[in-house]
């Protein structure tokens, strides 16, 4: 696990910044041009946020530009729903692209370049089945076997490739392959497939094409078309770099360069779109934006701010080696941000009545409360107080241990912003559950001060039972029980690591009246409880809050 990010490390330039500064100084590039290249086959997750922050962040820092390019070369899995969500999420994170492109816009150019490679004797049509191709690739220890179709003439290759495009062949009947070296130590260089036949409608090009370029061919060439100076991707692509370079060199086109950084992994979560899709499709979560999902839209719905996600990405830095980041670092970035921004309010999630026996039954007071001690400009508000309040069940204990400073018979406690009260007893139902707590207040302690200076150790929050509103509160826990849910024993899958208690729905929570007219995504700190955000499905007569995070890292203690 990665833990050390000392301040000195943070000021230091990361390796990408060093490369870029060198390239600018040496005149290798005049201005930098990056791109963010998502495949529109799912919603963006926090790993993508990292890539977005790097690509857009570097361009911004060095006065360059970033394109958004949809890497839409696989019609079977892609959809405009994903395209729209990706754009929304990038904007929400606070970035804007210079140009919007689609790899599918380059299909004609890519086709022409493929013909050029055929003419140069650097590509050929192969009739082998996928299985044969796989078998003949050899292994890391042993060289592969040349395809029997490897030495077709240029004319024949051009004709067959053209026929592939025209739809003369079935899926899998033929492929176009680069002619490199079947004994190459890098398996990616053993005559990699450039095109395969897929008779499927594409979300943008419809039925115009039935041959689609492979990632390795389409990606670098798209970079080159857009004059991308620094093509930044994740570490697993480093063994693809020789092929990336081979295509560009063979075609003699703009020499984009690929650089790799370590992908972001976070504890207790999975990050592959395939797995996230499975969680959605099979109903393990309510959708891509389920607040337990590591998707950007999930974090948004949960109450995360774009600033906190950007800060998190900045804090964890850019690494060259794979690492696992603790989920709590994301939560800490969130707490830092919301501590400054979120108004404090009082809400009781597990209510029990507190009756103040010596307070006039027909009286109500309006007490003053500070909205945000971190931000004076947020001002103050009035909260109502009467003889019957709600407090948290666990703020009362009948037989309390010595260090319990909250409600227990005979002990004084401060009611936040209100008075000091002394607990006198409780009522119980026939099975022994506490149904009400009784106390008496000291009228001289309005606002919570003691005129005689006596010390009151505990302060608890409350809500006026005669003047409050009800809400449903979703309390989330980690979606997975294990730090690395992808690591499973044989016969098990990541689904076996799902946390069955990742969602607890609390009904009948009691909130102060000031929360009556909140709107989705409004964020608050419920004093002593945590940070909460209003859910999309919330309405004035049916308030729903999502717990974004606890006030402190409660997970760390459990470990
Ligand atoms: P997944 O494996 O989740 O499907 P992907 O790499 O296939 O992800 P793309 O849409 O191709 O998803 O990714 C777009 C960009 O985001 C790529 O440049 C990719 O390297 C980067 N990216 C994806 N996952 C991460 C991650 N966990 N950390 C950092 N960057 C990532
Ligand atoms: Mg990908």
Image (cartoon, rainbow, N blue to C red):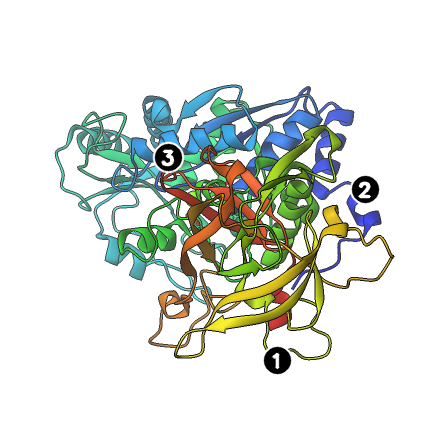
**Would residue 317 be seen by someone viewing this image from the given angle?**
no
Whereabouts is ligand 2, in terms of quadrant? top left
Disc number lying in front (3 or 1): 1
Which of the 4 image quarters holds residue 15?
top right
Q: Is mark 1 within 8 Å of ligand 1?
A: no
- Quarter holding the N terminus is bottom right
- Decide which of 271, 254 is in the foreground and name it: 271
Q: Which residue is mark 2?
A: 11
Residue at image point 77% right, 64% down: 457
Mark number, residue 352:
none
- Decide which of 521, 296 is in the foreground and name it: 521
**Would residue 42 be seen by someone viewing this image from the given angle?**
yes
- Quarter holding the C terminus is bottom right
Q: Is mark 2 within 8 Å of ligand 1?
A: no
Disc number lying in front (1 or 2): 1
Mark 3–mark 1 distance (CA, rounded to whole Å): 87 Å
Q: Secondary structure at mark 3?
A: loop
Q: Secondary structure at mark 2?
A: helix
Q: Which residue is mark 3?
A: 121
Residue at image point 55% right, 59% down: 355
| Relative image position of residue 542 (x, y in whole percent) | 36, 42
Mark number, residue 399:
1
| Relative image position of residue 368 (x, y in whole percent) | 68, 38
Q: Earlier in the sequence, mark 2 or mark 3?
A: 2
Label 3 crowd bin: few (<14), some (14–19), many (20+), radius 10 Å: some
């Amino acid at each position: 696990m990665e833990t050390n990010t000392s301040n000195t490390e943070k000021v230091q330039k990361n390796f990408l910044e060093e490369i870029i500064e060198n390239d600018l100084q040496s005149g290798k590039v005049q201005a930098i041009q990056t791109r963010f290249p998502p495949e529109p086959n799912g919603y963006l997750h926090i790993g993508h946020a990292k890539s977005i922050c790097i690509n857009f962040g570097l361009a911004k820092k060095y006065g360059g530009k970033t394109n958004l390019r949809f890497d839409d070369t696989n019609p079977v899995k892609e959809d405009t729903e994903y395209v729209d969500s990706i754009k929304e999420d990038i904007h929400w994170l606070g970035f804007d692209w210079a140009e919007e492109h689609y790899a599918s816009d380059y299909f004609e150019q890519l086709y022409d370049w493929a013909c050029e490679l055929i003419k140069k004797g650097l590509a050929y049509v192969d009739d082998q089945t996928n299985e044969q191709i796989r078998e003949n690739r050899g292994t890391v220890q042993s060289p592969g076997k040349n395809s029997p179709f490897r030495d077709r003439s240029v004319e024949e290759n051009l004709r067959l490739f053209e026929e592939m495009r025209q739809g003369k062949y079935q899926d899998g009947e033929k492929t176009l392959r680069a002619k490199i070296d079947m004994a190459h130590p890098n398996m990616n260089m053993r005559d990699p497939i450039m095109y395969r036949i897929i008779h499927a409608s594409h979300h943008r090009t419809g039925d115009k094409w039935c041959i689609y370029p492979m990632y390795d061919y389409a990606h670098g060439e798209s970079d080159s078309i857009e004059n991308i100076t620094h093509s930044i991707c994740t570490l697993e692509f480093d063994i693809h770099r020789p092929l990336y370079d081979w295509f560009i060199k063979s075609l003699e086109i703009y020499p984009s360069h690929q650089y790799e950084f370590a992908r972001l992994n976070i504890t207790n979560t999975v990050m592959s779109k395939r797995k996230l899709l499975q969680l959605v499709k099979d109903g393990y979560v309510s959708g891509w934006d389920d607040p337990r999902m590591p998707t950007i839209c999930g974090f948004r719905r949960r109450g995360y701010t774009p600033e906190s996600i950007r800060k998190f990405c900045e804090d964890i830095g850019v690494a060259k080696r794979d690492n696992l980041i603790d989920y709590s670092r994301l939560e800490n970035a969130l707490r830092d941000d919301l501590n400054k921004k979120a108004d404090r309010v009082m809400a009781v999630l597990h209510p029990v009545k507190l009756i103040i026996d010596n307070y006039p039954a027909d009286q109500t007071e309006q007490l003053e409360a500070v909205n945000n001690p971190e931000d004076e400009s947020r001002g103050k508000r009035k909260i109502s107080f009467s003889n019957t309040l709600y407090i948290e069940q666990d703020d009362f204990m009948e037989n309390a241990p010595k260090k319990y400073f909250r409600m227990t018979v005979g002990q004084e406690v401060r009611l936040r912003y209100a008075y000091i009260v002394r607990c006198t007893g409780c009522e119980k139902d026939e099975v022994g559950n506490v149904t009400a707590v009784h106390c008496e207040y000291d009228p001289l302690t309005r606002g919570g001060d003691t005129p005689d200076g006596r010390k009151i150790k505990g302060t608890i929050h409350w809500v006026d039972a005669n003047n409050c509103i009800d809400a449903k509160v979703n309390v989330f826990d980690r979606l997975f029980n294990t730090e690395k849910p992808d690591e499973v024993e044989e016969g098990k899958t990541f689904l076996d690591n799902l946390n069955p208690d990742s969602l607890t729905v609390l009904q009948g929570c009691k909130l102060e009246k000031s929360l009556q007219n909140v709107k989705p995504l409004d964020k608050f700190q419920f004093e002593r409880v945590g940070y909460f955000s209003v859910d999309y499905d919330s309405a004035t007569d049916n308030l729903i809050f999502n717990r974004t995070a606890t006030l402190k890292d409660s997970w760390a203690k459990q470990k």
